[in-house]
Image (tube, rainbow, N blue to C red):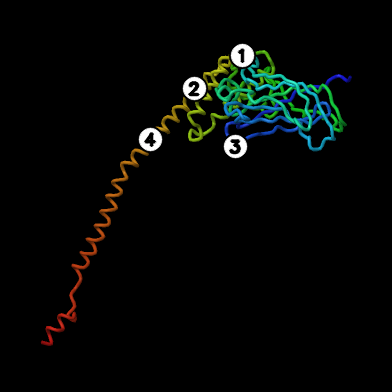
Amino acid sequence: MEKPIDKKITWVIKNLSSLQSEKVYSDEFVVGGCRWRLLAFPKGLNKPYHFSLYLTVADSECLSLGWRRHAKFSLTVVNQFSEKLSEVKVTQHWFDHKAVDWGFSEMIRLTKLKAREGFMVNGEVVVTVKVEVLQVEGRVDVSEEPSPVVETADVNGFQVLTSQVDSVNRLFEKHQDIATKFRPKNPYLKTAYMNALLSLTQSLCQSPKETSKDDLAEKYSVLAYLKEAGFELGWLEKKLDEIKEKKEKEEACLARLQEMEEQLKPLKRKYSDLEAEMDKEKAALLAARASLSLYDDDVSEDLSS
């Protein structure tokens, strides 16, 4: 028997809370000559209070008659602040035309997923799957495809995307002590923290009008996790406090404007009524000032008598 083939795949689900569809699929990937993809139910599959997650055969309709694949796999909802807190479930299954997907309807409770504990950061949920193909029955006609190469660069000990290098460099230039007390050593965890920091700094550029109270609460939660990890972020907390103050002023102004609008409504009605009365009085005034004609019918009758 050939050595089992395994591969680990990462899937980032963006804007999870705002997704309207009942289910979402990842891109396809190839392991052991088989095409797979992940299937997620953001609002649960027959479990309304859970996030459901499955591994599914991507090209089942195109496979030869009698195909079967035996795979062992693990599904993980990654805690982006502490890998130890990630939700991991392991199973194995014989996939065939009657059962093309397998997984967990109760992968993680939605309350836990959205509780600002690191599972959903800036609306993003990170899912990983490690697939080990144990046995294949039926013709395999898909060659193993290399995973796309993601170019990264090292900036002060953090592996970041090349597109992020300038942003990270600017952070260290302006705040040289930002990571002097940063404790985590795991490279993947360091990258997750840096991504969270970059997302937080970018989100602070939003207008207060575009920032809700829930958004602010999530930003403060992310800030707390980053500070707990050792980042020096007093300057960032000050900016966040300024945004909070602006948001409070905005809400106070909106409330005051609404109050004034309510006070203005009866005055507007009174003004409208007075205008109507004035129009009547103007008409009466014009009638009172109108000249009499000597040739009115009643005058003519008096002259002829």
Q: CA distance from mark 1 to mark 3?
A: 38 Å
Of residues 198 and 266, the one drawn nearer to the viewer in this rendering: 266
Amino acid type, label 3: Gln
Q: Earlier in the sequence, mark 2 or mark 1?
A: 1
Taking the spot 89% from the left edge, 19% from the top edge, the residue there is: 1
Q: What residue did someone put label 4 on?
A: 255
Q: Quadrant of residue 7?
A: top right
Q: Earlier in the sequence, mark 2 or mark 3?
A: 3
Q: Earlier in the sequence, mark 4 or mark 3?
A: 3
Q: Please, what secondary structure does the residue beneath circle 1 have?
A: loop
In the drawing, does residue 112 fall left or right of residue 38?
left
Q: Please, what secondary structure does the residue beneath circle 2 have?
A: helix
Amino acid type, label 2: Lys
Of residues 290 and 26, the one drawn nearer to the viewer in this rendering: 26
Amino acid type, label 1: Phe
Q: Is there CB contact under 8 Å for labels 2 and 3?
A: no
Q: Residues within 10 Å of mark 2 (few under 14, many from 20)?
A: few
Of residues 224 and 1, the one drawn nearer to the viewer in this rendering: 1
Q: Earlier in the sequence, mark 1 or mark 3?
A: 3
* Residue 264 spot, x, y in % from top left: 31, 44
* Residue 25 spot, x, y in % from top left: 69, 33
In the drawing, does residue 49 fall left or right of residue 94?
left
Mark 2 or mark 3: which is in front? 3
Q: Residues within 10 Å of mark 4 (few under 14, many from 20)?
A: few
Q: What residue did someone put label 1 on?
A: 182
Disc marking residue 238: 2
Q: Earlier in the sequence, mark 4 or mark 1?
A: 1
Mark 2 or mark 4: which is in front? 4
Q: CA distance from mark 4 to mark 1?
A: 42 Å
Quarter of the picture containing the C terminus is: bottom left
